[in-house]
């Protein structure tokens, strides 16, 4: 889900946020000003350079109450939670319970029942986005009303069956093809192997060991406050779209977190606190594509590798970058200006936010 632009009220910066000795987020402040001018309800960012940190929130977390946003407000990180799911899968690989080259059907027979022509798809294909599976998101958005998206929960099986209605040649494929369906399959597989819910698996494997005290897998219903409320337009009228039951419990889109917690996750992941060093290396150096929804890059600072994580859907967008030693990090979340829901047009603020994040990271080289 992506949104474009419209107008709304924007608040003043949160003066209680961390004030570092050296200003780290100058480029982000320029982005915040432009986001404000274009009607974004809130922007929250976290910048870390060794012992220095800057954590800021600007705007309001609820246009109804006009409550000032604070850095600890939670947000949907749609898509950016997939590396967390990947950690749990790789822990199964470490334990010898699953092999990357296992066919999915060996662990989840229901997969082949839904996608009978896709029997060659492996766990590696899912993690590398080379399964070629149809993405369930576009047909979901096209076939459901806003009321249904907000109040009708879906199971992993239902999401897969929505995807199966799309006519595509069977995979796997030799090119990168992001599909939310890959992660729904992996989430279902995790529940099957652990014999318990994905929320509990992620809490034990990721959230608790990484110190992510404000992160959880969403359950149906209104997310617990304080949340950054997101909005869409329906027939020209603004509608609160903070509750999204269609992705509650989703392995691709169901994680709710904060910018600081997302930074904590990447720091824990890159420094060996979640998976073994050789496991992490196998993810970042996999060919032709990295595994686990992460994007390694050598283009930020000379001689220093970074990893990027992106997420976004509906009124939310989040981006994060971290050096491999976890010492330089930038994480930004924006509540986008309200707009009609669609799945094709990326809002202009999204690439602008990415550019500001990259400029901030490069200043720390």
Image (cartoon, rainbow, N blue to C red):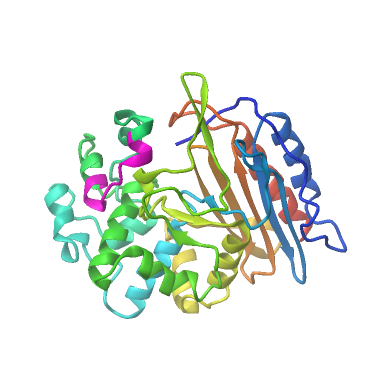
Q: Is residue 99 visible?
A: yes
Question: Viewer-proximal residue, 77 or 71?
Answer: 71
Residue 72 magenta-drawn? Answer: no
| Membership of 151 in magenta stretch | yes
Residue at the image point whose x is 27% and y is 72% from the top: 194
In the picture, residue 128 is in which quadrant? bottom left
- With respect to residue 303, does 336 lie above or below? above
All told, the count of numbered labels is: 0
Relative depth, front residue between 123 and 265: 265
- For this view, does 300 lie left or right of residue 226? right
Q: Position of residue 217 (x, y in %)?
A: 42, 59
Where residue 170 sits, quadrant-wise, is top left
Magenta span main SS: helix
Residue 278 located left or right of residue 112 = right
Q: Position of residue 341 (x, y in %)?
A: 45, 29
Magenta segment, which residues?
148-159
User: 275 and 240: which one is in front?
Assistant: 240
Quadrant containing the N terminus in the rendered view: top left
**Residue 126, image quadrant:** bottom left
């Amino acid at each position: 889900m992506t949104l474009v632009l419209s107008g709304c009220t924007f608040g003043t910066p949160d003066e209680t946020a961390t004030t570092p000795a050296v200003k780290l987020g100058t480029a982000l402040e320029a982005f915040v000003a432009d986001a404000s001018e274009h009607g974004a309800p809130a922007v929250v960012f976290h910048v870390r350079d060794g012992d220095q940190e800057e954590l800021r929130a600007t705007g309001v977390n609820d246009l109804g109450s006009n409550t000032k946003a604070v850095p600890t407000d939670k947000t949907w990180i749609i898509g950016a939670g997939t590396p967390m799911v990947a950690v749990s899968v790789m822990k199964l690989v470490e334990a010898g319970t699953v092999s990357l080259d296992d066919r999915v059907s060996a662990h989840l027979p229901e997969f082949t029942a839904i996608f009978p022509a896709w029997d060659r798809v492996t766990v590696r294909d899912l993690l590398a986005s080379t399964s070629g599976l149809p993405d369930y998101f576009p047909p979901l958005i096209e076939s459901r009303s806003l009321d249904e998206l907000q109040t009708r929960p879906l199971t992993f099986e239902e999401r897969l069956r929505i995807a199966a209605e799309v006519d595509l040649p069977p995979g796997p494929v030799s090119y990168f093809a992001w599909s939310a369906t890959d992660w729904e399959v992996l989430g279902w597989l995790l529940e099957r192997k652990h014999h318990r819910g994905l929320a509990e698996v992620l809490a034990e494997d990721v959230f608790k060991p990484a110190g992510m005290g404000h992160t959880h897998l969403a359950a149906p219903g209104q997310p617990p406050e304080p949340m950054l409320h997101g909005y869409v337009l329906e027939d020209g009228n603004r509608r609160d779209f903070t509750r999204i039951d269609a992705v509650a419990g989703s392995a691709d889109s169901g994680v709710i977190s904060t910018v600081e917690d997302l930074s904590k996750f990447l720091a824990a992941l890159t420094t060996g606190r979640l998976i073994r060093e050789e496991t992490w290396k196998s993810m970042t150096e996999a060919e032709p594509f990295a595994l686990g929804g992460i994007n390694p890059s050598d283009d930020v600072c000379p001689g220093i590798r970074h990893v990027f994580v992106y997420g976004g859907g509906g009124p939310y967008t989040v981006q994060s970058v971290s050096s491999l030693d976890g010492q330089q990090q930038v994480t930004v979340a924006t509540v986008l200006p309200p707009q009609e829901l669609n799945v094709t047009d990326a809002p202009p603020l999204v690439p602008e936010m990415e550019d500001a994040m990259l400029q901030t990271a490069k200043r720390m080289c």
